[in-house]
Image: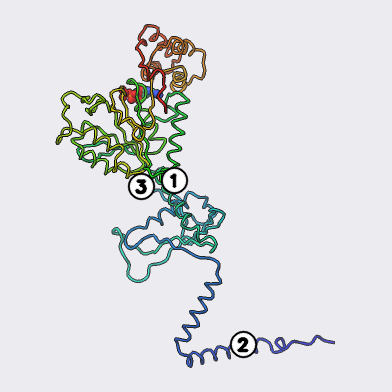
Amino acid sequence: MPPVASISEKEGPLTYWTYVTSALAVLALARTIVPQEWVDCVQEWFSGLLTSLDPFCSFTFPEYSGASPDQHYELVKLYLGSKDIFGAKRVLVNLPRNAKQALFSLADGESFRDEFKGFDFEWVHCVKERTGNLVAIDGEVQQEVRSFRLRVHRKAVPTVVQYVEHIASAARKLEQLDKELLIHSNIDTYWDEQPFSHPSTFETLALDPDLKRRVKDRLTEFKADREYFARTGRAQKVGFLLHGPPGTGKSSFIAAVANFMHYDVYDLNLSAVNNDHTLRSLLASMSNNCCVVVEDVDTAGLPDRRGTSNQAGKGTKGKKDEGPTLGGMLNFTDGLLSNSGSERIFIFTTNDPERLDAALTRPGRCDLHIPLGFCNARVFKHLCSTYLGLQDDKLMLPVCALLEYQKAQVTPAQVAGFFDAHKGDPAGALKAVHGHLKSGHGELKLRADIKSGSVPI
Ligand SMILES: Nc1ncnc2c1ncn2[C@@H]1O[C@H](COP(=O)(O)OP(=O)(O)OP(=O)(O)O)[C@@H](O)[C@H]1O
């Protein structure tokens, strides 16, 4: 018996189209009868229903807020560029003018899925043609409207603020790493800036390995401890006092810190500062994330522990244009204004810490006192390794013995001088240092504090 055909099959496509056409006709008729407000109402209700059924929410980060670039857009762009976005089909590659490396970003319509605290965060880069009047921003006609759209599950919504803060902080770090370092020097009441490209790093700096490790740990902690400083109600700043004879690496140390932290340097020349007011203006115009350096602070003419000025002819400080006072300097390093900045490292150097006023060297102003002294065997071996490429070579032993057992004294700068003079001739270089020490030139007396290295850090 042949199979019985169903009605729809029997009636075929003709009947189907008849139904559709009739439904459309009824709808068209209804539209003419039902008032427009009712139609709008039903549409609104329907789209509300769809939205409430959708478990996802979206957030838009536009490129511009009014006529100014929006910071979030740039930060998100930078952050996503540091992620593995190469799964996207199209990636934009830019090399901005002052950037050190290429910047990758999502092209129009491309998406990237990120994860934070166990939730998925999906980003889409949206680019639309601008409709209506074209606007010019910074002299450039904006034909497109760009934004990043973030799509998250409703459950993840409470985490969004935290996630955006995480993005901003990660992007700011990237921004800083990518920027060229500057050294600022004070002229009258303003800072003059130059590129800072001192090559000293903690790798090239010959310093007792334990001391070096403690300094690096302290710096790493300082950088990561934003929350700790906030909790304890303090500005994120730290002070170092470097002391030691000339040529023991104080300037090299400062450069190593700046390169390690990737901070600009503000090199404050106190003798070019007219008064406390100028000192305050200079402080107010400094950026965050920087090293503020005052070299040879003992010779800057500030009154010392005994209340006398350290510089001839500058005994009556404090009057107009006679230089900053000790009080001005104390406020500069730990006053209301200096505590308004963040991520600042104050570094003072001196050949003679005894001469400094105790208020200047107290914790809060100088948290770490770092003695930089004459070479010991470990420092000498480090110089042999960086300058001569020697590692634990027996050629070094005679000099090491003099340094360790006879306490012969030579500064790293003197050793560097001998090594420079005998480039490519390690044996000759070591012989020259040995001869120098044997001839009695290294007989200077070490000061007790530098010799013992006992000042705590
Ligand atoms: N600890 C060190 N490690 C590596 N190189 C050093 C060190 N100390 C000094 N040098 C070498 O000696 C030169 C002078 O050092 P630096 O200017 O850092 O010493 P300083 O203590 O700041 O001297 P001053 O007090 O005279 O300004 C540097 O260019 C560097 O080549």
Which residue is pictured at 37% across the width and 11% down the height? 442
Say which quadrant the N terminus sits in: bottom right
| Nearer to the camera, 388 or 293 | 293
Q: Which mark is residue 227?
A: 1
How many angstroms separate mark 2 from mark 1 (CA)? 69 Å
**Badge 2, how many Cα within 10 Å: few under 14, some, many 20+?**
few
Q: Which mark is residue 17?
A: 2
Q: Which residue is mark 3?
A: 97
Which residue is pictured at 44% across the width and 42% down the height? 225
Upstream in sequence: badge 3 or badge 1: 3
**Badge 3, how many Cα within 10 Å: few under 14, some, many 20+?**
few
- Answer with the quarter of the image where residue 87 lies: bottom right
Say which quadrant the C terminus sits in: top left
What kind of residue is marked 2?
Trp
Element under disc 1? helix
How many angstroms separate mark 3 from mark 2 (CA)? 63 Å
